[in-house]
Amino acid sequence: MSTDARTGPAPVPTGPLSQIDYSERIPNNVNLNQDRRLQRALEGWQPKFLDWWKQLGPALPTKDVYLRTAIAVGRDGWAHFDHVPMEEYRWGIFLAERNPDRVVAFGKHKGEPAWQEVPGEHRADLMRLIVVQGDTEPASVEQQRILGETAPSIYDLRNLFQVNVEEGRHLWAMVYLLHAYFGREGREEAEQLLKRNSGDLDSPRILGAFNEATTDWLQFFMFTYFTDRDGKYQLGTLKESAFDPLARTCEFMLKEEAHHMFVGTTGVQRVVERTAEVMNEHGTSDTFEHGAIPLDVIQKYLNFQYSVSMDLFGSEQSTNAGNYYSSGVKGRWLETRRKDDHVLLDDTRQMNYVEDGEIRTKTVPMLSALNLDLRDEYVADCANGVRRWNQALEDAGLTERLILPHEGFNRRVGVYAAHHVSPTGEVLDDDAWAAAVDGWLPSEADRQAVAALMVPEYEYGKFAGWITPPQAGINEQPVEFDYVHLAGEGLD
Ligand SMILES: [Fe+2]
Ligand SMILES: [Fe+2]
């Protein structure tokens, strides 16, 4: 049976797309009210989402939070900021505007009109990609659930909650596609997205990095820097998809995602700045006793989050990735700006692998190595933040520097998975690795010492001692603005 026969045709957005209808129970710009079956199905999922939010969303009780909400999908002024109770946030369905002339940019369907429906032969692949992407969104909310209890400031608390509500909205984005285009199976997958939970032994999230606990705010900043950035790159490939509703959904998600990476980049930077101040003030790199996180511990957190995020790109060589590309379901990062034939049948590239205890290079077909192509783009982007953080160290007159570890360090997926590789790229045997690993990855003692610094600072405009204040507030508000009202506040 075709998708159409099961669900009726998906709603086609018409009219001026830039406005979002907030009079509906589910805000949207896809004319949801013109498809009663789909609207009812999504309204049936909505209370389950809210139950999940109450149980596994932010644990800290709040009255309201200064949040941005999308009100339009256009380039200018797409968001509105106001204090809202988080459980009343208007999670909705927002797709970037449709380009009626859009054609498939790559693969064997290159030049054909983009798909407005799911072709039967690519149905399973597309649903799998949407489910895997969708699974990461609520996972990160679950991972970050308890962080509010130790927020270094009200400003940072607000940013945490903004990221959380938007990851919730990204779940909505994927659930919309599942309901609208994948019939009963899609609705079942949408239920499962709320039933798997991060770190659950019986029913974990699909990808490894999304089952790791986010224990403290340094890890949160590393997560938003490295793991949300993986999300950016995955969304970037889906934004190129021949399946136009998926492409348009991801295009709008990327607008929201930019703030998440801002939180990571500036968060780590502010930690580094504070550490540098304390190092200069006390003339020691062991800053724990002076209330700041030592640089070598920051480096270990970086090593950890970078390496688990690298695993999210999958094996360097992947037949699936090549098939996704050729069939049009998933493109490359900035596909349309690449200067090649966008089919890649004759192209090759170099890739590293491990043999006889050393890292060697071989030539492989480009189509087989598209996960690596995406990962390379990601690595180059990650390096920008590290440069910025090192600039802060240089500005403070320090000679210490942070580095991105070698691509083979601490990997569980791909060509390095069966090997130990040091942060500088030496292949090590088991004993050498075991002897050195506590210097490279956060030990239990490191995590405890960081956790001991994580005392909440809820006074407006004040910041915990291990982090500097930001340069500016959110949406041109002052840094000391009342971004969050905690539960019980203002009752006296
Ligand atoms: Fe997201
Ligand atoms: Fe994100």
Image (cartoon, rainbow, N blue to C red):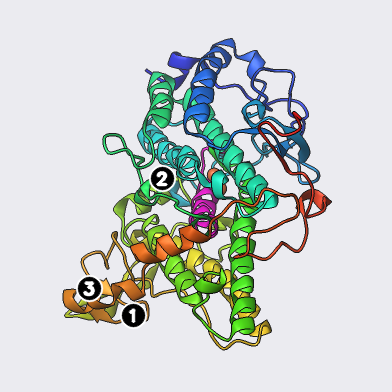
Figure quadrant of the N terminus: top left
In the drawing, what numbered circle is on residue 425?
A: 1
Residue 198: which quarter of the image? top left
Residue 432: which quarter of the image? bottom left
In this picture, residue 431 sits left or right of residue 65: left
What is the C-alpha distance between the residues marked 1 and 3?
A: 16 Å
Going by the picture, which residue comes out furthest to the front?
A: 492
- How many neighbours does mark 3 have within 10 angstroms: few (below 14), some (14-19), or many (20 or more)? few
What's under tag 2, amino acid-wise? Ser
* Tag 1 near tag 2, CB within 8 Å: no
* Residue that mark 3 sits on: 434
**Which contiguous range is marked in magenta?**
221-245
What is the C-alpha distance between the residues marked 1 and 2?
A: 36 Å
Tell me the element at label 3. Answer: helix
Residue 418, horizontal then vertical, whole percent: 21, 66
Q: Is residue 225 magenta?
A: yes
In the drawing, what numbered circle is on residue 110?
A: none
Residue 78, horizontal then vertical, whole percent: 76, 41
Q: Earlier in the sequence, mark 2 or mark 3?
A: 2
What's under tag 3, amino acid-wise? Ala
Residue 382, horizontal then vertical, whole percent: 53, 67
In the drawing, what numbered circle is on residue 327?
A: 2
Q: Earlier in the sequence, mark 1 or mark 2?
A: 2
